[in-house]
Image (cartoon, rainbow, N blue to C red):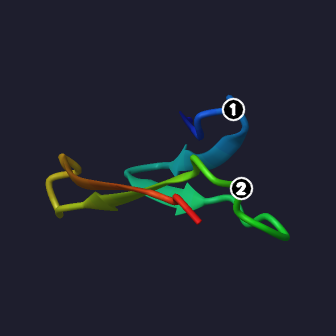
Amino acid sequence: MITDASGRIVAEMQGDQVQRIPHQELAPGAYFISLLQNQEVVTVLKVVK
């Protein structure tokens, strides 16, 4: 699983895919993970608003 800065689960593995768990609002500190086809993490964006 992937958590944001507060430890809230924001994504989880579904087989070989990462599926984001939707929230009503993404809190500051939440992360978005971009993956290549080989499942390597290539981009991590942090919400700062």
x, y (%) of residue 40?
A: 18, 46
Identify the residue at horizontal 85%, vertical 70% (top origin). Answer: 24
Q: Are marks 2 and 1 in contact (CB under 8 Å)?
A: yes
Residue at label 2? 27
x, y (%) of residue 22?
A: 73, 66
Residue at label 1? 6
Identify the residue at horizontal 70%, vertical 62% (top origin). Answer: 26
The quarter of the image holding the C terminus is bottom right
Residue 1, quarter of picture: top right
Task: Specify the amino acid type for callout 1.
Answer: Ser
C-alpha gap between disc 2 and disc 1: 9 Å
Element under disc 2 = loop
How many marks do you count on the picture?
2
x, y (%) of residue 43?
A: 23, 56
Element under disc 1 = loop
Q: Nearer the viewer, residue 43 or 47?
A: 47
Q: Within 10 angstroms of label 1, few (less than 14), some, or many (20 or more) residues? A: few
